[in-house]
Image (cartoon, rainbow, N blue to C red):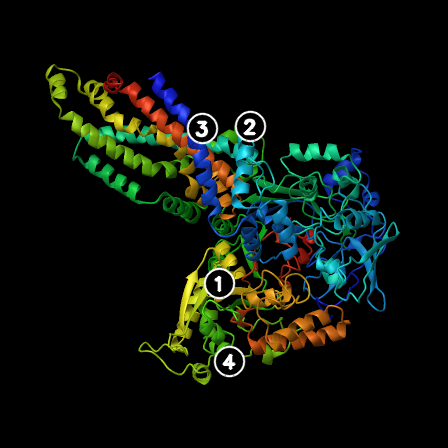
Amino acid sequence: MALAAGAAVLTAPEVALAQGAKYKEAPALADQVKGGKLPPVEARLPEKPLVVPVAEKVGDYGGVWRRAFLGPADANNYVRVVYDALFRFSPDGAKIEPKIAESAEPSADYKTWTIKLRKGAKWSDGQPFTANDILFWYKDVLLNKELTPTLPGWIRNADGTPAKVEKVDDQTVRFTYAAPATLFLTAVANQDGADRTFAMFLPAHYLKKFHPAYADKAEIDKMAHAAGFKAWTELFANKNAPPENPERPTMAAWAPTSRASDPVFTLRRNPYYVGVDKDGNQLPYIDEVRFTYFADAQALNLQAIAGNFDMQERHVNMTNYPVLKEQEKSAKKYRVITWPTFGGADAVIAINQTYTADPVMGKVMANVDFRKALSLAINRDQIKESVFLGLGEPRQGVPAPWHPYYPGDEWAKKYTEFKRDEANKLLDGIGLDKKDANGIRLLPNGKPATIEISVVPAFGAWPDVALLVSKDWDAVGIKTIVQIRERALHFTMRDNNELMAEIWNEDTSAFPYTGNAKVDPRNTPILTMGPLWLRWYATGGKEGAEPPPAMKRIVEIVDKARTAPPDEQVKLSQELYRIWAENLFEIGTIGLTPMVQGVVVATNKFQNVPKTLGNDWPLRSPGNARTEQFYFAK
Amino acid sequence: MTRYILQRLALLPLLMVIYSFVIFAIIQAPPGDFLTAYVATLSSSGSSISAEQIAALRSQYGLDQPFIVQYFLWLKHLFHGDFGLSLEYQRPNAELIGEQLGLTIALALFSFVLTWVIAVPAGIYSATHPRSWADHALTVINYVGVATPNFMLALILMWVAFAYFDISVTGLYSPEYVDAPWSLAKFWDLLAHIWLPALVLGIAGTARLSRIMRANLLDELNKPYVVTARAKGMREWQLVLRYPVRLALNPLVSTIGWYLPLLFSGSLIVATVMNLPNIGPLLLRALVNQDMYLAGGILLIYSFLTIVGTLLSDVALALIDPRIRVEK
């Protein structure tokens, strides 16, 4: 198996264009070409188009993909469907493949990367897509202090300076870093404008109208004011966001024709999309994607059960899985597919190891033997059966077995067996051997050992996990209170070091060095394992709490692995996850379930949906399923 | 009367300023701000955002400024008739509220009319035929109507419609009409969908109104003037409708003004459950996501309507009941 995620492996497309194939196009586009409104398909496609492998069959043109979303804050729903990036993750998440760009080539020392674009590629308005569109992003957006106050980590050298980006020719751009950038492609595969950021390639010809370096500042200010914005930067961000501005040209397979703030957010096929199938049919197959607005995820779920979406996985609640399966059998309108999470664990209990509100209990919580005892005290099979509907497996928050960073079965299963006696012994051993009349262990100061788990019902079933865990912990003499909190309150308390323990999921284990990995205590927002460690690192050791040696080693590994050659990176990562499991910085319960956007409902006619898929945010699933090759069977 | 109305109207601006402060304070009271909520939304759908990005957005939106500064900035803009920009939608709040206003009013009026058309005749029938089997039946229906939360009723109806008739009753249009321009066909489609939510919204009100109507009318029917009129040979239905019914309506009319704010806020949960495109879900989402200028704008409109509604009730009561006019 090829090296995954972290490493810099780029695979060539798995298929090639059939010999002598002629390009074909959707009937609607052919009509426009006849009417003289559109250039012929050969002129719209680049010289070397992207050849997209189909999951099952070469598809038919046409159809409207009915989907649902939860309004503008759910813009990532669109982001994930189109996955508009230069490079993208493969369906299994193990490789990175070219998409809008043609290729990427590292230098031997990984300090320089050369990206080649497709000659003749065009934006959805027919304008050429060239190196200038990347240089515009670099010079006028990334290096513009007003638009980008702080440089994102992936384009920053260790000393804080930006990496150098130069245009070699119209189709070639070179990136030069001070240190080896082995994770370059992993980062680039996510520079697609998600989360209100700027993608690394922007339609310069369109956006220059709103940038003071190219247009009259007074004129721009007037436009900003008219739209209700305070500054030109807000107008620029708004004009650049496809879900907020259908005028903005895009490179994606579908381009918006309405806004995410409208009742229906509609995307229509981009006649200039760079992809074809192996027979030369220009993609996408599907004409239109319609996101219908739902104010409430429950109403959305009811519609999903009724079979009113052609393909929907986002916001489908795993607790509805049995109902969906039943309908699948009785109504025969759709099929249900499950995509398990990409490693980690779907409910982990993070115990605050820098808790100061109760110093005595805080000291106990920082003791690794205490956490081992708590982990051994949990009956994970019960959680698996009753909360996760028998799906998934007990595990710690480490990568999945198919991932190169996987530390091995021994570590994935570390302290996951249900051993109440051993847990009791461990607790006795750390000085919690006295109990009160209710069987609750007493702290050195004579107070009962009490822990509170704060839960946000973000993925439905977590309160149930918390309740089962609390019973198990009560049974070994640790009084456990389950507190369900409103999410903003929970997040604020987490930042203020007020949480004792929380339930969340470990979903970043495949990507410990990019994005907001939870293993790195310097990231915010992190799990509540050590809010004061964050403070310690942020202030250079002046404030906060000094992390234990094991945690320091993890940080060391993260820094080292970022610039290590691929082989060494894999070794370092496995060490990292051995430390992670051994020290129980978070206590894993069940993982590899379809909890996070992994229950897929697809109508019978909706085809080419893969039966398995690497399902994670960095993979932009279902975007890595190559959505442009989804089709409706006639 | 005119003087009285003018006095009340003069107080309006002052009340609005006070309300604006209270509203802003309450919206700001929960911990965190729009970005905390935004980060929470992202994390609970499996994505994340970097700390640098949050800090940049926070200063861009002005959320790092002290409460009082934010409040006065908001107030300043309000004085210029500017409701500000929604943080979530990145569009002017006035535009967002305006878009939902038409349907919100249509739905509210529809359910209002439905309520009265059902409740008043039902109340009259019950009062004139007390303790008949029809009265008992209506009483039972009324009690159930009052006691069932309407969102519960909505859920039950939605499930029944789906499970037994295989139709979906969420939304106000069939899917093909949602973003279609207005046409006769779309209007018919709206009518075909609007009655169910209108009924769900109106059912508690209907039950309450018809109980009040029944009680009031029963009181009136035993009064001497009714006996006198009857003794003089007046026809029964004419007698009942012309005198006691008018009196029995008084308490109902005095609450008509409350309908103004209820028109907008009453449907919040039902509209969310049934996915109706009106102002209720907009407000709920704005509050949950701490999109404070949008929530503030909507709540200010509610406050305004409550004040005006109370005033209208008083005026309506004076018009319908000569006794109140004379006292003034």
Mark 2 chain: B
Q: Which residue is mark 4?
A: A369
Q: In the rendered image, which residue does mark 3 sit on?
A: B13
- Residue A29, x across and y down, in percent: 75, 40
Instruction: State left or right for residue A97 relative to residue A308.
Output: right
Q: What residue is shown at x 43% (from left), y 81% (from top)?
A: A420
Q: Which kind of residue does numbered mark 2 sit on?
A: Ser
To the question of a shared chain for discs 1 and 2, the answer is no
Q: Nearer the viewer, mark 3 or mark 4?
A: 3
Instruction: Report, in whole angstroms, how far the alpha carbon at label 4 lies from the one at label 1.
Output: 22 Å
Q: What residue is drawn where x is 49% and y is 58%?
A: A490
Which quarter shows the N terminus of chain B? Answer: top left
| Tag 1 near tag 2, CB within 8 Å | no
Q: CA distance from mark 3 to mark 4?
A: 64 Å
Q: Nearer the viewer, residue B115 or B281?
A: B281
Q: CA distance from mark 1 to mark 2?
A: 56 Å
Both labels 4 and 1 in a single chain? yes
Q: Which residue is mark 1?
A: A498
Residues at discs 3 and 2 both on one chain? yes
Label 2 Cα crowd, 10 Å radius (few <14 / some 14-19 / many 20+): few
Mark 3 or mark 2: whose residue is earlier in sequence: 3
